[in-house]
Amino acid sequence: MSKSQPLCRVLSGTARFAAVAATVSALVVGAGACSSPPEPSPATPPASPTSPPSPSVSRTPPPTVAARPLGWGPDQQDADRAADAVATMSTEELAGQVLLPFYSGLDAEAQAATVQRLHLAGSIIMGDNVPGMSDGQVDTAAMLGVTRRLQAATQAGGRSWPGMIAVDQEGGMVSRLRAPLTEWPAPMSYGAAGNAPLAGDAGTAMAAELAALGFNTDFAPTVDVTMGPADRAVGARSLSGDAGTAAGLGVGFAQGLLAGGLLPAVKHFPGHGSVTADSHESLPVQNGTPEQLRTRDLVPFQAAIDAGLPMVMTGHLAVSAWQPGVPATVSAASYAELRAMGFQGVAVTDALNMGAVTGAYPDDSAAPLALAAGADLLVMPARVDVAHAAIVGAVKTGSLPAGRLAEAAQRVVTMMMWRGRTGAAPGLPPGSGAELSRHISAAAITVLAGPCQGPLVPGSMRIAGGSALDRARFAAAAGAAGISVGSGPLVTLIGFGGSAAAPEAAEAAVAVALDAPWPLADSAAPTRIALYGRTPGAFAALADVLAGRAAAPGRLPAAVGPHPPGSGCG
């Protein structure tokens, strides 16, 4: 999407899905989500400093304070109201406003009490907090009850702005809520499809279903530029191995989330896709030069900033060129770089309970350090009460300046006042995006080796690999496409962490990578297919290609062994 477009503009990838997109767009616009005027297009050249002012401009009264956008969503009126609110807060209240905790299990009532007691910014919902997920189906009524209870807790002290009810919902493997909500393929699908409007439509539809359940924030999209198989942590969560493509798709998806009613956060600054370690376990080191960072990893973040997106999440990786050995989440140099790129919004940390942080910063000591470095919102400290006390204590000792804490709290409150003023999105029923999800997989599926036309298997086949659910879904899709299961050539499904060297993969006539396509580099199968997902829609797209009922238009978004980016039949 062009950054000159209003953030609430819904882009329809195809006429087929225009009805869904138009419905969401009408609902959101009707709720007032686009009350702020759009930023002018950067493609429009600025007026020459020597040009005389236009008479029409000179007669136009200056804009009111309330109508002045800040360049990242809110208006000046939101910032002014936030400043007034923060000025009345105690240190304890300010410390709460910069913390977004998780909780274990289904006891939302206990979490609500903690939110109220510590004046917290809100809550993030993880998979074990979702009612019904243990049975494989989200209890949507109960989920709405949970989010409403947690939201009420944030406002129990008389706050006039909503709290954050957040989730990590990217699609693919990072999906905290599943059926009956729409299941979305991996984000790499958008890169394989090469369609930014389609990414925007998906973001809108995903957000609309979550908004109907009381969510207002989604820590997505991942805009890390993947370097390929050595990228252990991101993989198919990455949109592309090309920086410009990841930038365009990431902005499109994030603007779609905004249109559907959720605040997006692009992640993981300065880019987790070109490091080899997994920050869930240890601290990755980014040894790229400043020029390499500017021309690769930082490109999608600069695009997000230029588009006026409200949040950027910093990642737990040490950038040698900035501050060696220190995670970006607690690095003053990292936040200085982010602000130097023009970012004015909320800088949020990745989860503070991850291995890259907890080993070096025990007992939530990273919380005040991150704030002092420049963070505004701290996500998932290991123990929120300990983190809260550490922040209050750091202010008392002077290691965390009181003004820095107030600045961070004011940014968060400004964003949430804007969110509250523009109104909650009405949302859409769960499952509304199922046909769009299938279409994305059909547009993304990529044949790396084998025929580009006609049936790839005869009327019958055998299935191996994947999970029991994968095989069941594939068998059902095959039956619908006219392919029986039980005899014939072997089709092997290779999931996350799987290998083409596994016994069932070694004899495959068709090898299918369900997540990132990297395993196909080692496959000897005559036909090799990248699917980028394991949803019902993805398996339907696969069955249609195998039966010769549909082409495979996708192209590799990153290199896979000898196959360069762009490989495929499309």
Image (spheres, rainbow, N blue to C red):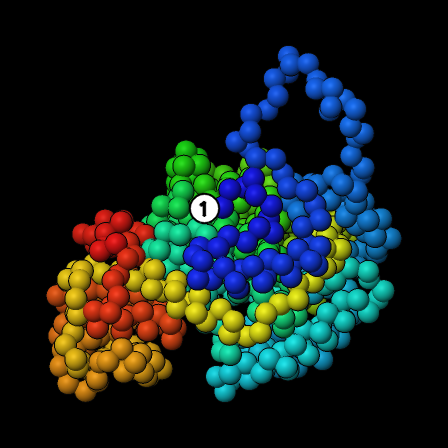
- Residue 46 lies, with reference to residue 102, above or below; the image says above
| Residue 189 visible in the displayed image | yes
x and y percentages locating residue 255 in the rendered image: 55, 52
Q: In the rendered picture of this protein, how many numbered marks are placed on residues? A: 1
Instruction: Please give the name of the residue rendered at 70% of the width and 19% of the height, measured from the top-left corner.
Output: 54
x and y percentages locating residue 395 in the rendered image: 76, 51
- Residue 39 lies, with reference to residue 367, above or below; the image says above
x and y percentages locating residue 287 in the rendered image: 39, 42
Instruction: Please give the name of the residue rendered at 79% of the width and 30% of the height, measured from the top-left corner.
Output: 62
Query: Which of the two residues, 139 or 550, is positioned nearer the viewer here?
Result: 550
Q: Amino acid at mark 1?
A: Gly
| Residue position for label 1 | 248
State left or right for residue 457 relative to residue 170.
left
Secondary structure category for the residue under label 1: helix
Query: Which of the two residues, 29 or 558, is positioned nearer the viewer here?
Result: 29
Tell me which corner region of the image, top left, top right, bottom left or bottom right, holds residue 114: bottom right
